[in-house]
Image (cartoon, rainbow, N blue to C red):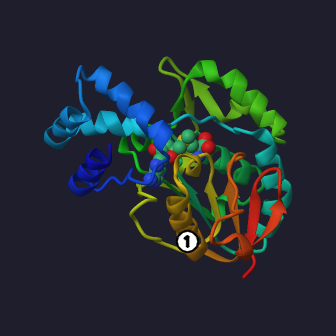
Amino acid sequence: MDLLLEAVYRHYGFDFRQYARPSLRRRLTRRLSLEGLQTLSGLQERLLHEPECMERLLLDLSINVTAMFRDPSFFRVFRTKVVPLLRTYPFIRIWNAGCSTGEETYSLAILLREEGLYDRTRIYATDINEAVLVQARQALFPLEKMKEYTENYLASGGSRAFSEYYVAAYEGAQFDRSLGDNIVFARHNLATDRSFNEFQVVVCRNVMIYFDMSLQNRVHDLFYESLQRLGVLALGPKESIAFTSHADHYDVLDPQNKLFRKAR
Ligand SMILES: C[S@@+](CC[C@H](N)C(=O)[O-])C[C@H]1O[C@@H](n2cnc3c(N)ncnc32)[C@H](O)[C@@H]1O
């Protein structure tokens, strides 16, 4: 497994060497059998010679599950505790790292539009996986998800009719194109790439659960460097900055919803 991960890193630059081992092993074993191969070295050879196989593995390794207004209480607290801080800035930059197919990013855009802040916001939404970014740019989500997303939206403090934001088409729910006006979707690998701007907010939820401690520390270095002083860091429900190298550099803004504020 070490050899395969090293080969992928050297050949493609995708660094999974520090991803948590048990879930890596499960995913590689699954890919082995789907490719009809017997050994990891066989898989390594195919990966190096067939970029399409690498794309398939990338989809396996980067779990893309997401939802609009996922964990509604997070968005409710974002409205009540983060939005008032953002009002004090003339221009707002948000980094949504590990944005997957864009549901989280469009949820933030809707929330900020309702709060009258979207026009002065730019959201940089990044992911390691180009395939999910292509989907994200389309702002087209499955119609059958709209009931769940409407419930999430209402539970998150949304007060409009959620259906105002999309039209039901044959292919799915097409979200209002103008919601994408201030979003830049771009590829960025948290394991290898550098910081690219200074932000008032970094939202990175349900991404670092797949990383080992040393990669988590690297990513926290990156976020610390990318946040301006008093900037806000938002993590997923199972994630924390406790035990990372930056635990002492943040105040806790909301412990349940994993909101932290860069203090020093
Ligand atoms: C489970 S999804 C989380 C989506 C969204 N943040 C949410 O909470 O609903 C995790 C995302 O992290 C991305 N990811 C995994 N490793 C990454 C890396 N090294 N750099 C950037 N994104 C990565 C995956 O491609 C995937 O889209």
Q: Secondary structure at mark 1?
A: helix
Q: Is residue 36 left or right of residue 144?
A: left
Q: Nearer the viewer, residue 7 or 156?
A: 7
Q: For mark 1, what is the residue?
A: 221
Report the residue at 69% width, 62% height from top: 241
The answer to whether residue 138 shows anywhere in this view is no
> Which residue is nearer to you in this view: 223 or 208?
208
Residue 231's x, y, as percent? Answer: 70, 72
Which quadrant would the N terminus be assigned to in this image?
Answer: top left
| Residue 7 vertical placement versus 193 (above, below) | above
Q: Can you see residue 42?
A: yes
Pick the front one: 131 or 161: 131
Residue 236: image x %, image y %? 68, 48
**Occupied quadrant, residue 41:** top left
At x 26%, y 39%, the residue is: 54
**Residue at the spot x=78%, y=54% of the render?**
78
Query: Which residue in the rendered view is the most extreme toward the left?
Result: 49
The CB of the residue at mark 1 lies under 8 Å from ligand 1: no
Where residue 79 sits: x, y (%)?
A: 81, 54
Marks counted in the figure total 1
Which of the pair 189/17 is nearer the observer?
17
Q: Is residue 263 above or below residue 200?
A: below
Amino acid type at image mark 1: Asp
Crowding at label 1, few (<14), some or many (≥20) Cα neighbours within 10 Å? Answer: some
Image coordinates for residue 90, horizontal then vertical, percent: 69, 75
Q: Quadrant of residue 137?
A: top left
Residue 13 falls left or right of residue 107 = left
* Quadrant of the drawing holding the C terminus: bottom right
